[in-house]
Amino acid sequence: MNKRLEREGTLWQSRFKSVLVEGAESALQTVAAYIDLNPIRAGMVRTPEEYQWSGYGEACGGGRGAALARAGLARISGVMQRDPGFAEDWEVAAARYRTLLYEEGREVAADPQMNQSGRPGFSNEEIEAVHAMGGKMSLPEALRHRVRYFCDGAVLGSEAFLEEVFAREQLLRQRFGEKRKSGARTMRGADWGGLRVMRDLRKDVMSRQASSDPRQ
């Protein structure tokens, strides 16, 4: 093909390249964030958790490989290095890594005078909002995802409402066991304000955003 087209080099792609990355936190964070932000730079999605074929997207989506993806991101973000007890706490790792992604994914404006092209990314307001939330999703952001609390939470409402229902419904108390003394449990994954839930869900609380195709 090269002879016919009078060209040189590989036909489809450039040659394989690899980089040896130090196992320190800063190097791993930088490389991981670069990979997870590729879909943002390419303009394929608006937020990194929307892209399902990435480690961060899989971790947020709660799919088959979510546990492995979450463990890796927890290690990369330094959570496991600082306290091995946080290894199972995806909420802590997710907040820290999400903050990193938004900081590293800051949009860059084009500069024609310097012959520099721009780069899609997050505005200063979006980054400040993530910092203000401590890396957690806001309620509007959370509601764009599939939220398991709304089908598996048993009872949802204010703390006072949860405690009232728990005290009134004997069958409900029996369902959760005699040792349980209160009804309200804090909701995970986002800032839910004053909302509480009866069942304390610890896994796959939220999955990635629903498809925009109404047929799915």
Image (cartoon, grey):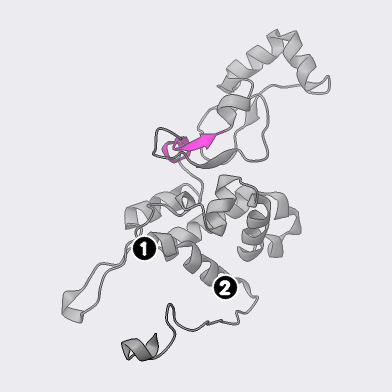
Relative height, residue 106 to residue 133 (above, below)? below
Residue ID for mark 1: 42
Residue drawn at x 54%, y 56% is: 56
The answer to if 72 sits in the magenta stretch is no
170 displayed left or right of 135: right
Residue 142: x %, y % from top left:
48, 38
Relative height, residue 85 to residue 167 (above, below)? below
186 displayed left or right of 127: right
Residue ID for mark 2: 26
Around disc 2, counting alpha carbons within 10 Å, would you say few (fewer than 14), some (14 to 19), or many (20 or more)?
few
Q: How many marks?
A: 2
Query: Magenta segment, which residues?
Result: 139-147
- Disc 2, SS: helix
Residue 150: x %, y % from top left:
56, 26
> Among all residues in the image, which is located at the extreme front?
4
Relative height, residue 38 to residue 27 (above, below)? above
